[in-house]
Structures are given as structure tokens and as C-alpha cells.
Amino acid sequence: MPSVSKFRYMQRISAALTATVLGICTGQSAELGDQVHLSKQAKTHWAFQPLSKVAPPKKSPPRFIKNPIDGFIQQQATKKGYALSSPARPEALIRRLYFDLIGLPPKYDEVKRWSVDWSPAKFEKLVDHLLASR
């Protein structure tokens, strides 16, 4: 590309990516040179909107709400007619933590040791233990 400067080349690549992303997200296609059309789409696309504070929903059973995000999940699940499943058993949580944090399954004796008297504090302690083992 000796005739095109590096900067101009990057501008063209950026425009092409923007056109592709907006085309995929909106179902419309835009030509690479149609910057006016892309600019109008970008102003209305959700990804380019400023962030705003939203109060968490209050109409949720307290047993499901452990943090504010749970309220949004409960609200959407109810709206779509889904029922939330029961909380995972300690053995399942331990297994998930091992896979997520160290990439290996726990040994049987580790699961037994950690699942005795399970509590949120013990969950945090296991997270710290696994992170320290790396």
C-alpha cells in the first residue's frame, strides 16, 4: 500500500468495521463511503447512547434477590414467563469455582471438605483459597 498513508488506511478499516457492525446490528447495509448514513445510525444505536442510572426493580421475592442485578434478572424472567431455578447445591458451586478459577475439577475429598457447613463466608474463603493457589 505505498499510495495510501497508514492513517488513511486505518480510517478505511475503521469505517469498514463500523459499517459491518451497524449492518449486522440493524439488519441494514451501508456502503463504505456512506459516512453520513453511518453517522445517523451511530447516533441512534443503543451502543452509542450515554449511560444512565436505573433504579433496580422492587417487586421481587426477597429470597431471590442477593444483589441489585438479581432484581433485573427476576423482572425479565417474569416478563418472559420463566421461573427461576432453585439455588445450586454447594457441590455444584464448588465444582464451578474450581473450573472457573483454576481450570481443573476438584478432587472428591476437596468437595467433601468444602461442602460441610456451607455458607456465603465459606464460598468467599474458597474463592480466596483457589486464587492464592495460582
Image (cartoon, rainbow, N blue to C red):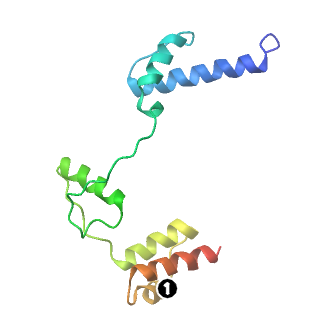
Q: Amino acid at mark 1?
A: Glu
- What residue is at 49 percent from the left and 17 percent from the top? 38
Question: Where does residue 102 sit, x and y in percent of width and height?
Answer: 58, 70
Query: The N terminus appears in which quarter of the rendering?
Result: top right
Classify residue 2 as left or right of residue 118: right
Quadrant of image for the C terminus? bottom right
Where residue 130 appears, as percent x and y from the top left, is 57, 76
Q: Is residue 119 above or below residue 12?
A: below
Of residues 124 and 89, the one drawn nearer to the viewer in this rendering: 124
Residue 100 lies, with reference to residue 27, above or below; the image says: below
Which residue is outermost to the right? 2
Q: How many marks?
A: 1
Across and down, in percent, residue 92 comes to 38, 74
Q: Position of residue 118 (x, y in %)?
A: 38, 84
In the rendered image, which quarter is residue 10 located in? top right
Where on the picture, by quarter, is residue 46?
top left
Residue visible at 45% across and 23% down? Answer: 43
Dot 1 corresponds to which residue? 110
**Residue sitting farthest toward the left:** 81
Compared with 46, 85 (above or below) is: below
| Closer to the camera in the image, 84 or 71 | 71
Q: Is residue 70 left or right of residue 82?
A: right
For label 1, the SS is helix
Label 1 packing within 10 angstroms: few (<14), some (14-19), many (20+): few
